[in-house]
Amino acid sequence: MRIVILVAAVLALFTQGALAQSGLTKVLEAELSRFAGPGGPYHAGVYVKHLTSGEVAKVHGDETFDSASTIKLAILVMAYQMADQKKLDLNQRYTIKDSDLRTGSGIFQYHDPGLNPTLRDVLLQMVITSDNSATDIMLAKVGGVPAVNAWLKQNGYVTTHLNHSVFTVRRVRYERIDPKYAKLTPEDIYALQTNNIRFTAPRKDLIAQVAADVAAKPNGQQILNMRTLPEDWLAIVTPAKMGKLVEGIETCTLASKPSCDEMKRMMRAQQAGTRKIPHWLSVPVAHKTGENNGVTNDIGMIYAKSGTIVMSIYTNGYTGLTGDADDRLGAVARLVVEYFDGPS
């Protein structure tokens, strides 16, 4: 009799969990179906795991998306693993050179020459300001694109692939204007995308030539901005696999506890994306954002009252205002927290 009661109780719990998971999935499906701008619906995917209960829900969670800067978390984890193995000293100082500078997000590009941060500081900026200069510095420190892809494969992230460094993802677009631009240096690319006279003045002829070649090429400006093909993306990811990466940081299965604590401290100090996952939440969030034209993403840990929630949400191809697209990510996060914690 006791065995029968125990089996019945287990089956009841299993059924309740399955129904709860189905319920969250339906909530997420309904919300993601509303993701549309002036140009119509756009592609969105989400993965959620409540670490206390083990409940998982996902919508388009195994489909591929443009990672934008969220892939920088893989570089972060690799660096801390190497630090744990004494293969990388994060206290070492690195002098930032002209060839390290990248446009886009980040602050290192605005400093005077010769800035000398520790590698830990470089990683911090890669996370909290999504610094592109910091990203390529640390990408080189962990072994470059091939090493990252080998690490991803060895650790089971088989649907995740780093295509480029920040430098090469920019240069390849100029190569499509004219193959001769395959020889452009990092300083050349930086000069083409900045108003820093220290770089632009010595390259005024190059800048004029590129502008003329872009104007002469059919749809030249569109080619420079093209991100529609997966090979144009910085990296290819799925929400589920990036959620697994975030979970590994939270549970300290990807690095030592002191290293994971440092990574979480960095993610808690995030300076970007306040209108994304954290937007309408009153609980702490540790996260890493990513965005470019038509892309806004956010992944991280929500420290809800009911337990930590891993959340990974990606949107590709949105039109209209970036703020509106970011707000939709925040709305999904609020629904997820209310699902587990109840209305605030």
Image (cartoon, helix red, strand yellow):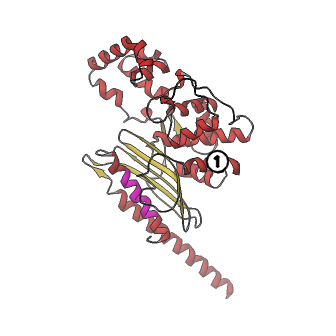
Q: Nearer the viewer, residue 217 or 287?
A: 287
Instruction: Look at the image and tell me in which quarter the C terminus lies.
Output: bottom left
Determine crowd level at label 1: few under 14, some 14-19, many 20+ residues with C-alpha closer than 10 A. Answer: some
Q: What is the quadrant of residue 224 in the picture? A: top left
Residue positioned 64% across, 84% down in the render: 4
Q: Is residue 254 visible?
A: no
Instruction: Look at the image and tell me in which quarter the N terminus lies.
Output: bottom right
Asked if 7 appears above or below 180 in the picture, the reply is below
* Span of residues in magenta: 326-336
Q: What is the quadrant of residue 211 in the picture? A: top left
Residue positioned 51% across, 29% down in the render: 111
Residue receiving disc 1: 262
x and y, in percent, of residue 58 in the image: 47, 58
x and y, in percent, of residue 192 in the image: 39, 21
Residue positioned 53% across, 71% down in the render: 17
x and y, in percent, of residue 267 in the image: 55, 48
Asked if 7 appears above or below 290 in the picture, the reply is below
Q: Residue furthest bottom?
A: 1
Q: Is residue 74 visible?
A: yes
Does 262 lie within the magenta span?
no
Secondary structure, magenta segment, majority class: helix
Q: Nearer the viewer, residue 232 or 140?
A: 140
- Residue 256 lies left or right of residue 198; in this view the side is right
Q: Amino acid at mark 1?
A: Glu
Residue positioned 43% across, 51% down in the render: 274
Does 332 lie within the magenta span?
yes
x and y, in percent, of residue 189 in the image: 44, 22
Q: Residue furthest front?
A: 112
